[in-house]
Amino acid sequence: MKKISNKDYQIKSKGKFDINQTPTLVDLQADKKEIEDELRKVGLKIAALQNKIYAAGTPAIYIGIQGMDTAGKDSLIREVFKDINPSGIEVYDFKKPTPLEHAHDFFWRHYLTLPERGKFGIHNRTHYEDVLIARIHPQLVLNQKIYGIDTLEDVDAKFWKKRFRQIRDFEKTQVENGMKMFKIFLHLSKDEQKNRFLRRINRDDKKWKFNAADLKERAYWEEYQVAYEDAINETATSHAPWYIVPADDKPTARLIVARILLDELRKLKISFPKMSVVEQEKFKDYKKALDNE
């Protein structure tokens, strides 16, 4: 199997991402079973590391996943993280903002669900929706009733530059306060999205996932590609890099994400809590008491 190198997928500085020149499919030189077997091995190693992080109570691990409709976000979360102790992981799937959420800044609902130290927090869609779908449909910005933003003319290039800066500041604050951030973009081709929509339509067990609104958004494909490229280039930093993962083959995408996480988590300087000499002596008494029952 071809070696997976993080640097092949990582974007950590502005202007390095060209969406049209980035592949949506990669050949790992392995068949589906080999890829799935390797994913299981990597997933167990991630779970073991998460157990250590949970015991240490630090750091917080944030994993934000973005991608076009049908990119495979749900199944990736299910397959990559299925071996992790549920006590140490929380998953949030963000939908259309509620009136309460609209009454606050666009970070608010995401801030409330950030992982506590020692836990994994996975966001299925993220605060980036507000520079993606809101950029394609700027009326959504007006719905937020931001003071001083009164007309569509106010939602101009300067507005988006400001919002990108706010995202960079938000993420820097989280990292400086003990969070490890992973931002994953599942890079899907338009042809593969079409195939996946057709599978949803044709299969009884998939029909429930089909939403006619998704076809309307597909009509804005090129606009979304521009929005993603701009958002990633504007917010890729050394402390909060983006990982661009080819998503046309789901098993391959899952393994790449898992390998990225494992390799980066292994760099963390963490260990199980150490006991003092006094505490260690107490454990001898605990063992003795149990042995003498």
Image (cartoon, grey):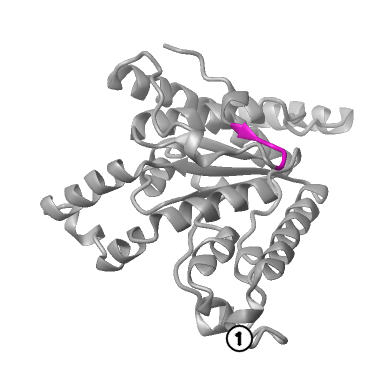
* Vertical side of 115 occupied by 58: above or below: above
* Residue 12 located within the stretch drawn in magenta: yes
The answer to which of 277 and 178 lies nearer the viewer is: 178
The answer to which of 254 and 23 lies nearer the viewer is: 23
In the shown orientation, is residue 281 left or right of residue 4? right
* Vertical side of 200 occupied by 52: above or below: above
Circle 1 residue: 151
Where on the picture, by quarter, is residue 251?
top left
Q: Amino acid at mark 1?
A: Thr
Instruction: Answer yes or no: is residue 83 visible.
Output: no
Tell me where the magenta segment starts and ends, as one range: 10-14
Name the residue at 61% across, 64% down.
Answer: 110
Q: Please rate how many residues cluster around mark 1, counting C-alpha atoms within 10 Å: few if below 14, some from 14 to 19, many from 20.
A: few
The answer to which of 27 and 288 lies nearer the viewer is: 27
The C terminus, quarter of image: top right
The answer to which of 24 and 185 lies nearer the viewer is: 24
Name the residue at 60% across, 38% down.
Answer: 17
Instruction: Answer yes or no: is residue 250 visible.
Output: yes
Q: Where's residue 166, x and y in %?
A: 74, 63
Q: Main secondary structure of the magenta part?
A: loop
Q: Where's residue 264, x and y in %?
A: 65, 29
Where on the picture, by quarter, is residue 1?
top left
In the shown orientation, is residue 124 left or right of residue 219? right
Q: Where's residue 129, x and y in %?
A: 53, 62
Q: Secondary structure at mark 1?
A: loop
* Vertical side of 145 occupied by 85: above or below: above
Q: Where's residue 57, x and y in %?
A: 72, 44
